Image (cartoon, rainbow, N blue to C red):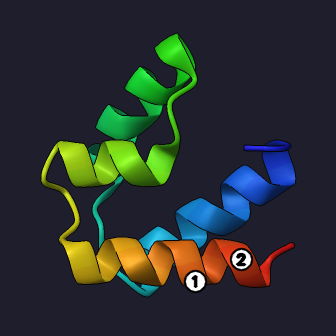
Amino acid sequence: MANRHSDIKLIDFLQTELALSTVDISVALRKHELDNSPLAMLLWQYGLVDIQQLERIFDWLEEQV
C-alpha cells in the first residue's frame, strides 16, 4: 500500500463494506508488514474473504487510483 492514508481508507472499507473484524484485519496486516505481500491476497489466502469479496476489494482499490 502506498501510504498511511490509503491504509486507513482500505481498513475502513474492509470493516464497513465487508464486515471484517479488527482481529481478522490485524492478522493479515502483520503478515503484510513482514513480507510486503498484497493485503487483499493475504485476506483471501487466510480465508478471511471469499473470491467475491476479493473482487470487491480489487474493484475498490482500482477506484482509488
Dot label at residue 44? none
**Could you tell me which quadrant the N terminus lies in?**
top right
Amino acid tagged 2: Glu
User: At 83% from the left edge and 44% from the top edge, which residue is drawn?
Assistant: 2
User: At 36% from the left edge and 38% from the top edge, which residue is drawn?
Assistant: 28
Tell me, yes or no, whether the two marked residues, 2 and 1, touch with CB atoms within 8 Å.
yes
Residue 6's place in the image compared with 64, above or below, is above
* Nearest the eye: 62 or 1: 62
Q: Position of residue 20 (x, y in %)?
A: 30, 67
Residue 22's place in the image compared with 32, above or below, is below
Q: Provide the secondary structure element on which disc 1 rests.
A: helix
Residue to which mark 2 is pinned? 62
Residue to which mark 1 is pinned? 59
Left-right relation of 60 to 21: right
Residue 45's place in the image compared with 33, above or below, is below
Q: Position of residue 64 (x, y in %)?
A: 80, 76
Amino acid tagged 1: Asp
* Nearest the eye: 37 or 19: 37
State the residue lying farthest toward the left.
47
**Could you tell me which quadrant the C terminus lies in?**
bottom right
User: At 46% from the left edge and 35% from the top edge, which residue is drawn?
Assistant: 29
Q: Position of residue 59 (x, y in %)?
A: 58, 83
Q: CA distance from mark 2 to mark 1?
A: 5 Å
